[in-house]
């Protein structure tokens, strides 16, 4: 009997992440719908369908990441696809880099960069158990990127470099970045020009 591939999508409770989860389930994968709040993950998983599982996962909390990895190990024994989708922005603060809050900047980098590193590191052994693992980091690159504010753009530039480092170091895992464009989501207060369905 063919075993279904296992996918984890972070911040999959809405927007692009939710649509990615739906698409993966449609293509025959068992999808772990990650969200900081379990109830949000449960609601999203129900909308994805029978092949979805809710997973509490806060990419900024090491204990939460470790618990998620342990659950995946216990229930599935491996991970075939990791989609690093979680991200936050300082939307609406364009053109004021000199006045950007350092605390806000740290929070954005904690999710958009360090969260990706932490989750990927925690899942590497599980990915190593898969026959053809894939790591995908969602990076909504766009010529209009400055609309997201003075901190978001640098965080995504750092994510690009991080993804390249993963691609070089973990060549067998096929690490890549996916650039869905300026998509209308809660990240930009639904001011984007594309849909989550098209972006996914």
Image (spheres, grey):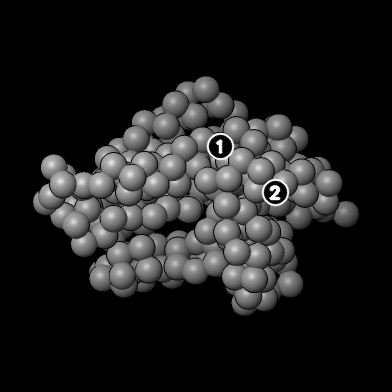
Residue 121 picture location, percent across and down = 60, 33
Where residue 136 appears, as percent x and y from the top left, is: 50, 44
**Which of 53/50 is in front?**
53
The residue shown at (39%, 47%) is 107
Q: Residue at x 53, y 46 (%)?
A: 60
| Image: 16 above or below 63 | below
Whole-percent x, y for residue 88 in the image: 39, 55
Mark number displayed over residue 118 = 1
- Please state if 154 lies on the left or on the right of 185 as rendered: left
Q: For mark 1, give the secondary structure.
A: helix
With 24 as the anchor, is 52 left or right in this view?
Answer: right
Residue 156 appears in the rendering: no
The residue tagged 2 is: 68
Residue 59 or residue 14, whichever sits in front: 59
Crowd tier of the residue under label 2, counting other residues whose Cα lies within 10 Å: few below 14, some 14–19, many 20 or above: many
The N terminus sits in image quarter: bottom right
Q: Quadrant of residue 33?
A: bottom right
């Amino acid at each position: 009997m063919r075993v279904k591939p296992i996918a984890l999508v972070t911040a999959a409770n809405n927007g692009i992440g939710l649509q990615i989860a739906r698409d993966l389930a449609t293509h025959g994968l068992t999808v772990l719908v990650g969200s900081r709040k379990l109830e949000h993950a449960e609601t999203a998983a129900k909308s994805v369908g029978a092949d979805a599982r809710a997973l509490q996962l806060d990419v900024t909390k090491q204990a939460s990441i470790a618990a998620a990895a342990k659950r995946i190990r216990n229930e599935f024994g491996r991970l075939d696809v990791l989609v690093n989708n979680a991200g936050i922005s300082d939307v609406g603060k364009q053109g004021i880099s000199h006045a950007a809050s350092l605390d806000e900047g740290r929070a954005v980098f904690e999710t958009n960069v360090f969260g990706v590193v932490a989750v990927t590191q925690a899942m590497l052994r599980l990915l190593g158990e898969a026959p053809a693992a894939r790591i995908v980091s969602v990076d909504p690159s766009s010529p209009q990127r400055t609309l997201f504010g003075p901190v978001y753009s640098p965080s995504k530039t750092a994510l690009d470099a991080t993804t390249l480092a993963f691609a070089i170091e973990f060549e067998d895992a096929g690490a890549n970045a996916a650039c869905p464009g300026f998509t209308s989501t809660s990240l930009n207060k639904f001011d984007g020009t594309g849909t989550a369905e098209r972006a996914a």
